[in-house]
Image (cartoon, helix red, strand yellow):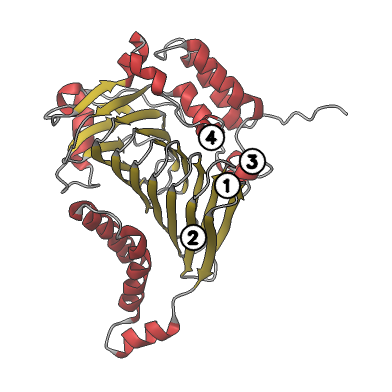
Amino acid sequence: MAAITLMKTPAETALVQAFEAAKATLPGDVESRAQAFETFNRNGLPHRRVEEFKYTDLRALVREAAPFAAKPSLDEAKRALLDAKSFAGVDAVRIPFVNGHLVDSAIAFDGLPEGIDVVPLASALASGHEWLSRLSPVDWASKNPVYQLNSAFMADGVMIRVVGEVTTPIHLQFVTSSTTPVATATRVLVVVEPEASVTLVESHESTNGAAHQPNDVVELIAADGAHVRHVRLNAEGDQAIALSTFAVKLGAEASLNTINVAVGSSVFRHQVFGVFSGENTTAQINGASMLKDRQHGDTTLIIEHAAPHCESRELFKTVIDGEATGVFQGKIIVPPHAQKTDGRMMSAALLLSEGGAMNNKPELEIFADDVQCAHGATCGQLDDDLLFYLMARGLPKPEAESLLVQAFLGEAIEFVENDSLREALIASVEAWLRARG
């Protein structure tokens, strides 16, 4: 039987042309970039016939490929950062990116605390820095087409090494200020050495009205005994198509507490790939998504318990209003040798309108016999009895609904240990509710 070849869409054709034009000027090994792009190009943008993208058909959603953003001038970058709002009141070391490019080092690395080393990715790629060998620590991510596209086009980013206890959060600040649609492809590698600890913060925001196309990857290697707290906020503009990947490899007795809060973008797909490579490791992986109008929000994760005696908890909350669509796909994998694994995954959706939809697909792949694993998914509306109770005590219906929504999402957000970060996330939820009216 003859093989079926799909015709390339305008977006796929534009990506081919963009790569051919840019590959000679992008820093680093041209051959490895070409290999990543060829792997992506062989299949094109993933579509609904690809099981992992059954509910998020990027071939249909990405009609055109935006041009990759040029590096802004220093004055342009300063103006964009002055307008940035996410986590503005949080005391943190800020490493800013504007239009996908690291801002001048005089701004980006001012006042780094002891225990943090930062290397700009562009210069590291150009010089063949030794830390580059630690990129792509998770095989599951490397097989993903969104990640492969980032590997082909990544032009800027940073590599961060953490030693000892760092008490000041590190804020990776991504701002897209262009008034016309642009694409970005940043890569960040964070290596937390044995027994070290750090709080890592990400914020992603862009202008409304422009269909920006960010494709950002953050990779984390937490060595034995390391402790990492990770907070991510998607506050992208209302037309953005935001693709993001968080890939993490955890050593023995390491711990991770991470949350992704999404209030922005027209379409987003946030991917989490985690590997427990050492024993007695724990992870709390949470998400809170707020969708309205015709937004499409997808959270997909694969967690592999590759070592015994590890514990993971996954909790994802989604609020859907208007004609928005939510997607949750989660998989816990337990190979035969990973005995005494304890993994529990839960997705809960709250529908505020009749036109919204939620697609849940939790999975377990268990090949060991001495484990405790469970998954669940719920989808429902606000409790009429609780709503009546609050209204009977004088609260208008919109305020009563807002309180119940905050309580619903609060279960996922309450795990954030830093008070300032937790309050900033709650403020984002409240702003979304006010905009809803």
Asked if labels 2 and 4 touch by Cβ distance under 8 angstroms, the answer is no
Could you tell me residue 414's position as x and y percent? 29, 60
Q: Amino acid at mark 4?
A: Trp
The tag earlier along the polypeptide, 2 or 3, is 3
Q: Residue at x 60, y 34 (%)?
A: 45
The residue that mark 4 highlights is 140
Q: Amino acid at mark 3?
A: His
Q: Amino acid at mark 1?
A: Thr
- Outermost residue on the left side: it is 111
The tag earlier along the polypeptide, 3 or 1, is 3
- Marks 4 and 3 sit apart, C-alpha to C-alpha, by 19 Å
The tag earlier along the polypeptide, 1 or 2, is 1
The quarter of the displayed image where residue 287 is located: bottom left
Q: Amino acid at mark 2?
A: Ser
The residue that mark 2 highlights is 347
The residue that mark 1 highlights is 56
Q: Secondary structure at mark 1?
A: loop
- Marks 3 and 1 sit apart, C-alpha to C-alpha, by 7 Å
Could you tell me residue 125's position as x and y percent? 37, 14
Taking the image as shown, residue 167 lies to the left or right of residue 239, namely left
Q: Nearer the viewer, mark 4 or mark 3?
A: 4
The 10 Å Cα crowd at callout 3, few under 14, some 14 to 19, many 20 or more, is some
Query: Residue 313 shows which numbered tag?
Result: none
- Marks 1 and 2 sit apart, C-alpha to C-alpha, by 17 Å
The residue that mark 3 highlights is 47
Q: Secondary structure at mark 3?
A: loop
Asked if labels 3 and 2 touch by Cβ distance under 8 angstroms, the answer is no
| Quarter of the image where the N terminus is located | top right
